[in-house]
Amino acid sequence: MEQPARHAAAPAETPLERAARAASVIADRSGIAHHDLALVLGSGWGQAADLIGETVSEIPAAEVPGFHAPAVAGHVPVMRSIRLHDSQRVALVLGSRTHLYEGRGVRAVAHGMRTAAATGATRVVLTNGCGGLNPDWAPGQVVLIRDHINLTATSPLEGATFVDLTDLYSQRLRDLAHQVDASLPEGVYVQFPGPHYETPAEVRMAGIIGGDLVGMSTTLEAIAAREAGMEVLGLSLMTNLAAGISPTPLSHAEVLEAGQEAAPRIARLLADIVARME
C-alpha cells in the first residue's frame, strides 16, 4: 500500500532572519532605508523623542514582526523614525521593550537590538527606570551605566558564541554624556528577572557583589547589541531607593510618579547627548 508523502517541516526562522524581516517592514513603512542609531526609552524617558528631531514615521510596534504592544504602563506602543536636528542622521526610537518576565523568551527580549542593527544602527542608547542602592542619590537622579551584573540566569547569545563584554558600555559615549552634564554619576546596574521587586536581602546581595542600581531590563539587550556590533550607552533614572534602603514599601505607581516628575529634565539631557553622538 502506498504511503502518503511526508513533507519536511519548514525550518524555524532564526533570530537574525526575523530581525531582517522586521527591518524590512520598518524600511517599507517609514520610507527610511537606513537608521544611524537606536534609542530604547524606558520608564520616564519617553519625552526625549519629541526633542531630538523631526518625526518622519510612526509605526505601531505590534505591526512589526517580532514586536508586541507594551506590557508595562508608561511605555509607548509605537516605534518612531526621527530625523535628528541639523543632521541627515535618523534615529529609530523604540518606545517599548519586551521584558524577560513577560514569558516570551530571551529571543523576544533581544529582538529590538537585532532589528535596530539590521536597520543600520551602529549605536544604541538604552534607558530604564530602576531602584538605587546609594542613599546619597535622590529619586530623579540619572546614573550612567558603566557595567552590569546579569542575574537572570540566561543570555541572548546562543551556541558557542563568545562575545567580549569588557567595555560593553562605551567609555567614548559616557565621555560625551559627561560633556553635557559633568555631574552625572556612574554605577553598576544589576538585572533581576522580575516581575516582583527585589527583597531587602537580594538588594543587600546586589550591593555586596558591586551593584549600585537594580532593575528588570537592559542587560540582555546590551549583550545582544554588542553581539550585533553596536556601541552601547546606558542611562538609568533612579525612581526610588531599593527595598530595605527605602523606608516605604515599593510600588509601580511610585516609579511612574518619579518618572513623570523627572521627564522634562531627563528628556532634555538625553536629547543633548544624542546631538553629540556622531
Image (cartoon, helix red, strand yellow):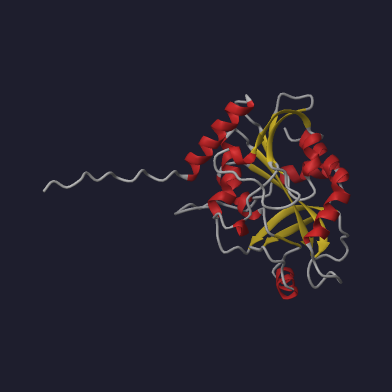
Image x and y of residue 129, in percent: 76, 54
Q: Is residue 57 above or below residue 16?
A: above
- Give the x, y percent position of residue 124: 67, 41
Q: Nearer the viewer, residue 165 or 151?
A: 151
- Report the side of 197 relative to 14 (left or right): right
- The residue sitting at 81% across, 54% down in the picture is 256
Vertical side of 152 occupied by 181: above or below: above
Which residue is the extreme one toward the front?
1
Q: Tell whether 101 sits left or right of 264.
A: left
Q: For residue 229, which quarter of the picture? A: top right
- The residue at the point 58 percent across, 26 percent down is 28
Task: Name the outermost residue toward the left.
Answer: 1
Residue positioned 57% across, 64% down in the render: 153
Whether residue 143 is visible, yes or no, is yes
Residue 93 can be seen in this image: no
Residue sitting nearer the eye, 49 or 204: 49
Foreground of the two, 144 or 131: 131
Quadrant of the image occupied by residue 55: top right
The C terminus: image quadrant? top right
In this picture, residue 5 sits left or right of residue 120: left
Extreme residue in the bottom direction: 201
- Residue 150 drawn at (x, y percent): 63, 61
Q: Nearer the viewer, residue 220 or 67?
A: 67
How far across and down, in percent of the image, does residue 242 sit? Answer: 79, 66
